């Protein structure tokens, strides 16, 4: 809290000084703050600077952040301007109310910039209307299963243009942004059914709907994200057009569909404020449109409650199944309206509402499916609310048959446990199924078919379907083929094997699958490949495997083994499909690469690269300066010798800081090659007392050889 006290004390002086700086001056200042942000303390200082800028007005702040985005090269200038114009008002609102050093500010720096450890989960005991009864999961009924289809993240692009450039400079391609991108002018033409660098055309969605209809499911579930990723262009008109196109396709092809709200399903994306935020920011029009579409798809009046804040509870006709669709965007790290002071424990009292619905189900002896967009254990779900939600899961674990999510675009699952310190088959309490996407940006388009017990509504098996949309032999429509089966491809790996059609895929079953992954890496590697349907499978060995298995066992996000790496590293566990920092490229997890918050991450990445380049130039030039001004011929001769030796022996840092070790030995003879960076800093500090900025760069840029 010392930083917060200091900033409060200096606020009047800082505000006065801020008013005398131009937008260009502030652009330089904030860009420098990004480059100097190397830890949690300096991230708080960066927030302090952004807060000062917000004090000069909303449009001024947007101009400054747009300028920083442009000079960083994080995105094309038009993308910078469009994204910030869309989400700027929410950022402005949050920054004005943010208190540097607070729990909220630290969560902001942990979630969006990656420079703070996540704060400890704030204690919040959920109260329940009745004690937990001594009931357990019901046994399978032995009746013939029904089929239920699960699909997610369609992201149809109504502006997709066959033959346009798929290798463009924008976040999504297959549009004629420029004359060079237009059909006939590019050597990288988009195909008729889609491309991995693009959101899909409407015709692919129609093809998938027809394939689902052919299966003739009892009903379907859709876990959100209708709208395409053109986030710098998207507006209310486009969102309504996209919602109409996708939900009309469902209505025309499918029977009953239960849907959930995605973070892209409004404009601007991600921004779903609670009722504590001024109503002018509330996307009521999106809630109303979705409630109308969902009522049409279900015919169940209770679905209309979604018009309040995107959640509803509905009892499936002629059954003992209650489906609860809740708004997970309240707990999403890219929802700027969530960064209130203090952060709300229960936005819109949704958790209280959820408890009431589960209690009704328990009293009526119903089973429950929870459907939502963002999995609770993901790194982009607030840890506090993940823990609060998990308390509810533990109380009603006998009532909850399963949970269903989307958002990640990948094929995953998440397990809940009654005791996360003893994660075993007999403490596993709930299973969350995370379905991959239709949009092909993370792998072939896909949907899933569950075999469901018609009495208990437990999941007995599922088959994943995919379509190869880039097959050169494809002449007509894509062929949707089975990819793998849960029971055949995972149950067969257990000891004893689980193949009987009458056995449920319980949480214990899925925990045992993770045990099989630990014992036999081939089981894990099969899962790892299926995660992206065999597309661009990153290497995952050693600690990566352990961390990923831990994540599968981490529906309470604080136990998911996701750790912040030092500096600007935005990886979701090592090897989870997010690329390591590279010289020019930076990737976010699927569904997280669009919007203003990921833009901050990209700016931070570019700032890190600029800082490292500056470190190399500064260090070498400063050391050369000392050498050239050495008073003795012997020193100059020794400089030459050491430089040659260091170069010929490859004595360099990982950041390509040529001759750095040799130079260090020249100026600090006691330094050893085995020294850590900290020891070298101590021995070199006297050399840089007159050039503190360069010494700071040296501190932040030095890497071990």
Image (tube, rainbow, N blue to C red):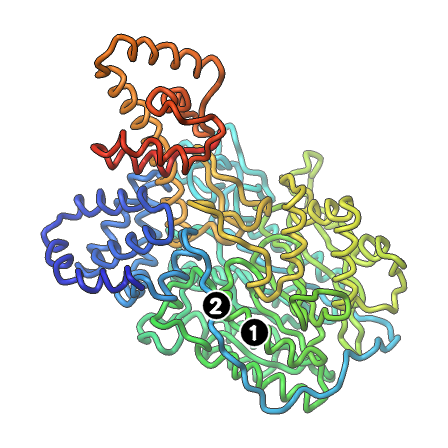
Q: Foreground residue, 474 or 369?
A: 369
Asked whether residue 254 is in view, the answer is: no
Q: Does dot 1 land on a helix, a strand or a loop?
A: helix
User: Which quadrant of the figure has residue 584?
Assistant: top left
Q: Residue at x 63, y 46 (%)?
A: 544
Neighbour class for label 1 at 10 Å: few (<14), some, many (≥20)? some
Please tell me how crowded label 2 is: few (under 14), some (14-19), or many (20+) other residues with Cα within 10 Å: many
Which label number is shown at residue 331? Answer: 2
Q: Which of the 4 quarters of the picture holds residue 391?
A: bottom right
Q: Position of residue 432 (x, y in %)?
A: 66, 65
Whether residue 497 can be seen here: yes
530, above or below 389, in the image: above
Relative image position of residue 171 (x, y in whole percent): 45, 44
- For the point 45% across and 73% down, the residue is 287
> Mark on residue 568?
none
Question: 333 and 483: which one is in front?
Answer: 333
Counting labels gives: 2
Viewer-side residue, 659 vs 81:
659
Check the image and report above or below for 108 versus 191: below
Q: Residue at x 53, y 50 (%)?
A: 589
Can you tell which of label 2 and label 1 is closer to the viewer?
A: 1
Q: Considering the numbered disc 2 on the image, is that residue within a helix, a strand or a loop?
A: helix
Q: Which residue is mark 1?
A: 389
Determine whether label 2 and label 1 are within 8 Å by CB.
yes
Q: Residue at image x 33%, y 76%?
A: 279
Q: Quadrant of the N terminus?
A: bottom left
Q: Position of residue 222 (x, y in %)?
A: 61, 65
Q: Earlier in the sequence, mark 2 or mark 1?
A: 2
Side (left or right) of 431 relative to 347: right
């Amino acid at each position: 809290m010392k930083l917060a006290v200091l900033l409060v004390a200096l606020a009047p002086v800082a505000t006065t000084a801020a008013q005398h700086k131009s937008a260009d001056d502030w652009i330089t200042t904030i860009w420098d703050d990004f480059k100097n942000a190397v830890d949690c303390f300096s991230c708080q200082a960066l927030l302090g600077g952004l807060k000062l800028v917000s004090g000069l007005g909303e449009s001024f702040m947007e101009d400054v952040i747009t300028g920083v985005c442009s000079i960083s090269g994080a995105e094309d200038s038009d993308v910078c301007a469009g994204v910030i114009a869309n989400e700027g008002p929410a950022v402005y609102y949050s920054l004005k109310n943010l208190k540097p050093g607070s729990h909220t500010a630290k969560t902001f720096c942990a979630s969006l910039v990656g420079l703070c450890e996540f704060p400890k989960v704030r204690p919040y005991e959920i109260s329940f209307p009745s004690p937990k009864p001594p009931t357990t999961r019901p046994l399978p009924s032995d009746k013939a299963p029904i089929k239920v289809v699960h699909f997610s993240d369609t992201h149809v692009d109504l502006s997709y243009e066959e033959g346009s450039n798929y290798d463009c400079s924008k976040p999504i391609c297959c549009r004629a942004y420029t004359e060079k991108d237009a059909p006939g002018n590019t050597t990288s033409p988009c195909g008729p059914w889609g491309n991995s660098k693009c959101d899909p055309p409407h015709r692919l969605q129609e093809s998938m709907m027809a394939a689902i209809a052919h299966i003739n499911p009892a009903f379907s579930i859709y876990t959100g994200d209708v709208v395409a990723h053109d986030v710098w262009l998207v507006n209310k008109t486009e969102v309504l057009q996209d919602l109409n196109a996708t939900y009309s396709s469902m209505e025309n092809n499918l029977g009953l569909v239960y849907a959930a709200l995605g973070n892209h399903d409004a404009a601007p994306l991600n921004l779903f404020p609670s009722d504590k935020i001024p109503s002018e920011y509330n996307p009521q029009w999106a809630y109303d449109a979705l409630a109308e579409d969902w009522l049409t798809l279900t015919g169940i009046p209770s679905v209309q409650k979604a018009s309040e804040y995107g959640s509803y509870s509905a009892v499936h006709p002629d059954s003992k199944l209650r489906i609860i669709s809740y708004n997970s965007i309240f707990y999403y790290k890219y929802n700027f309206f969530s960064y209130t002071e203090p952060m709300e424990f229960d936005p819109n009292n949704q958790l209280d509402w959820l408890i009431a619905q589960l209690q009704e189900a328990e009293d009526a002896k119903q089973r429950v499916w929870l459907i939502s967009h963002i999995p609770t254990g993901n790194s982009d779900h607030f840890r506090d609310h993940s823990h609060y939600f998990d308390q509810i899961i533990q109380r009603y674990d006998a009532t909850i048959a399963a949970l269903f999510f989307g958002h990640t675009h990948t094929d995953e699952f998440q397990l809940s446990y009654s005791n996360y310190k003893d994660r075993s088959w007999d403490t596993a309490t709930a299973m969350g199924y995370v379905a991959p996407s239709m949009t092909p940006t993370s792998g072939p388009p896909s949907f899933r078919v569950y075999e469901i017990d018609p009495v208990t509504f437990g999941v007995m098996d599922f088959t994943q379907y995919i379509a190869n949309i880039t097959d050169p032999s494809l002449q007509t429509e894509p062929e949707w083929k089975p990819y793998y089966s849960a029971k055949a491809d995972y149950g067969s790996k257990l000891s004893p094997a689980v193949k009987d059609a009458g056995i449920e895929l319980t949480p214990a079953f899925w925990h045992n699958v993770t045990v099989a992954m630990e014992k036999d890496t081939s089981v894990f590697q099969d899962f790892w490949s299926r995660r992206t349907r065999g597309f661009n499978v990153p290497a995952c060995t050693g600690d990566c495997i352990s961390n990923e298995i831990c994540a599968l066992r981490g529906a309470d996000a604080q136990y998911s083994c996701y750790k912040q790496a030092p500096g600007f590293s935005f990886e979701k566990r090592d090897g989870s499909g997010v690329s390591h920092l590279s010289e020019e490229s930076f990737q976010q997890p699927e569904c997280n690469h669009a919007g203003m918050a990921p833009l901050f991450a990209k700016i931070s990445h570019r700032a890190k690269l600029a800082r490292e380049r500056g470190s190399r130039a500064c260090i070498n030039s400063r050391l050369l300066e000392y050498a050239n001004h050495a008073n003795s011929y012997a020193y100059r001769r020794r400089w030459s010798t050491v430089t040659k030796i260091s170069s010929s022996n490859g004595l360099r840092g990982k950041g390509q800081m040529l001759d750095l070790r040799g130079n260090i030995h020249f100026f600090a003879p006691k330094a050893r090659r085995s020294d850590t960076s900290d020891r070298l800093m101590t021995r070199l500090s006297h050399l840089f007392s007159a050039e503190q900025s360069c010494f700071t760069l040296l501190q932040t840029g030095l890497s071990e050889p």
